[in-house]
Amino acid sequence: MKPQRRTASRSREAITAIAVLSVVLCIAGRAFADGGGSRVNLWPFIKPTGLVTLSLIVTAVGLAALRKIRPRTMLKLHKIFAALALLSALCHATLVFLSG
């Protein structure tokens, strides 16, 4: 069974890497589309990162509220989504400060 878990884990990692790479390429193309200058326009990314942060926070709070169903699983998911929310909030704040 362990080789199957490793294979499943590797395929999940590969899918995640492909998804992240495609998002980064789309963002980079959108950022440099304003004229090809050396300065990158960060304004189009402030609102989406704020929305992602808000939805991650709402998801983390919802998972904390549903902890009675499966306490250990929900707590693990809550911690993951809370950490992602903090990371997204830091990215959002960095974008705001850099573009200001």
Image (tube, rainbow, N blue to C red):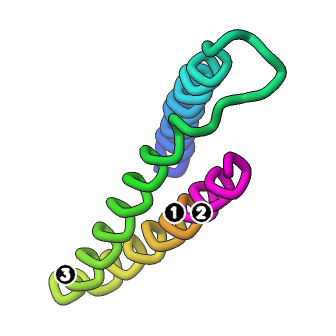
Give the SS element for disc 1: helix
Q: Earlier in the sequence, mark 3 or mark 1?
A: 3
3D distance between C-alphas at marks 2 and 1: 5 Å
Residue 66: which disc? 3
Image quadrant assignment for residue 39: top right
**Marks 2 and 1 close (CB-CB < 8 Å):** yes
What residue is pinned by disc 2?
Answer: 87
Marker disc for residue 84: 1
The relative height of residue 2 versus residue 87 in the rendered view (above or below) is above
In the rendered structure, the answer to whether residue 75 lies left or right of residue 11 reads left
Q: Main secondary structure of the magenta part?
A: helix
Q: Is residue 35 depicted above or below 10 in this figure?
A: above
Q: Is residue 12 left or right of residue 33?
A: left
Horizontally, residue 57 falls left or right of residue 80, namely left
Mark 1 is on which residue type?
Leu
Q: Considering depth in this image, is 6 or 20 the residue closer to the camera?
A: 20
- Image location (x, y in percent) of residue 89: 55, 64
Query: Which amino acid is tagged 2?
Result: Leu
In the rendered image of this protein, does residue 73 appear above or below residue 21?
A: below
Q: Magenta stretch?
A: 89-100
- Asked if residue 91 is among those painted magenta in the image, a careful observer would answer yes
Disc 3 from disc 1: Cα separation: 19 Å
